[in-house]
Amino acid sequence: MTQRAIPFLFMRGGTSRGPYFNAADLPDNQDDIAKTLLQVIGAGHPLNVDGIGGGNAVTNKVAILSRSDTDGVDIDYFFAQVSVTEQLVDFKPTCGNILSGVGPAAIEMELMAATDPVTEVRIKLVNTGALVVARLQTPGGFICYDGDTAIDGVPGTAARIDLQFMDVVGSATGKLLPTGNLRDRFDDVEVTCMDVAMPIVIARADAFGLSGYETVRQLENNVDFMTRIEGIRLSAGAAMGMGDVAKSVTPKFAILASAKSGGTIAARYFMPWQAHPTMAVTGAQCLASCAVLPGSVSDGLLLRPTNSPATINIEHPSGVIDVIVDYRVNGNDFDVHSAGLVRTARKLAAGHLFVPA
């Protein structure tokens, strides 16, 4: 069988990992890109045995990079979520963890040059249109992966990467509250449907008789719960103006509870058919915004901050993620200006992938 070679970088970005491509090395149209990525990942098998996928949603993510033609932007970042067991590629969402590796990958691919000692990369998230400013450690003009920054969900330490997300409201729906309501009710469960960096249907854990501190395995093994939240997600997706979301990974789903380890609030996040082992970067921004939004389902679960910007510490299954939210509350008027996080990334491999010609 004749095979085609495709240059790639294999990187960990935040708590996710996957291949990073130069857009020039992939087909021009989205349908052919999807066919290629299904082969790259080995989608359709629980172990992705005929590709480089990891058998989990957080290890089946793809970044496609190119120099940007937009004024004031350095790099265009196009994200793809490839299914584990289905022949499905979703281009609707973006991924903030994979985003962590975009700056380093762009320098490695020579799409832009590094500066000493820090390089600022202005990145357009093509899927949503959002802008992110990433600040990388580049002493001597070279990308540095070694450092003393630790993030929960990743062993060891690495170089610090600062991400500042701009214009995060209405990433997919154009609205902070896509249904127009602070709270909605589906299947007799109250939810807040928000769109900040990522559209999410947010409920309280106690609405399902849960503590909110369950492990990933406990949640996924609770078949009745997983079935119920999918039904709520489908109804909410339609109410959010997103249509039939049965085959889309957005909106996501999350449950909240009071923090128990010194954080601001506890959360469990769903991708949506699996429980996230840690916390998504985009999801964390939306959940942090929900935490500071008066009248949302977070009411009564936390001591809400009164000053902005505020650091929201979200407890998740592997630890805590901190989100700095710059927001404004004026009566019934609520707006999120930006959200900042600290992440790390590391280059794992580089070379060529091979797919059937």
Image: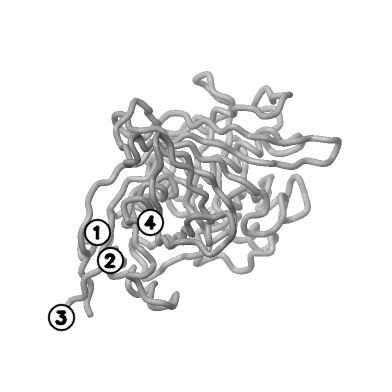
Marks 4 and 3, Cα distance to the nearest angstrom?
26 Å
Image coordinates for residue 350, horizontal then vertical, percent = 22, 54
Up-down: is 215 above or below 262? below
The residue that mark 3 highlights is: 2
Q: Residue furthest toward the left?
A: 1
Residue sitting at the far right: 331
| Real-space Cα separation, disc 3 to disc 1, in angstroms | 19 Å
Residue 47 horizontal side relative to residue 23, left or right: left
- Left or right of 144, for residue 183: right
- Image coordinates of residue 164 in percent, x first then y, are 56, 40
Q: Earlier in the sequence, mark 2 or mark 4?
A: 2
Dot 4 crowding, Cα within 10 Å, few <14, some 14–19, many 20+: many
SS for callout 4: strand
Residue to which mark 1 is pinned: 52
Q: CA distance from mark 3 to mark 2?
A: 15 Å
- In the rendering, which numbered label is found on residue 61? 4
- The answer to which quarter of the image holds residue 148 is top left
Residue at position x 64%, y 41% in the image: 338
- Residue furthest top as drawn: 262
In contact (CB < 8 Å): disc 4 and disc 1: no
- Residue at numbered disc 2: 40
Q: Name which of mark 1 and mark 2 comes first in the sequence.
A: 2
Relative to 301, residue 179 above or below: below
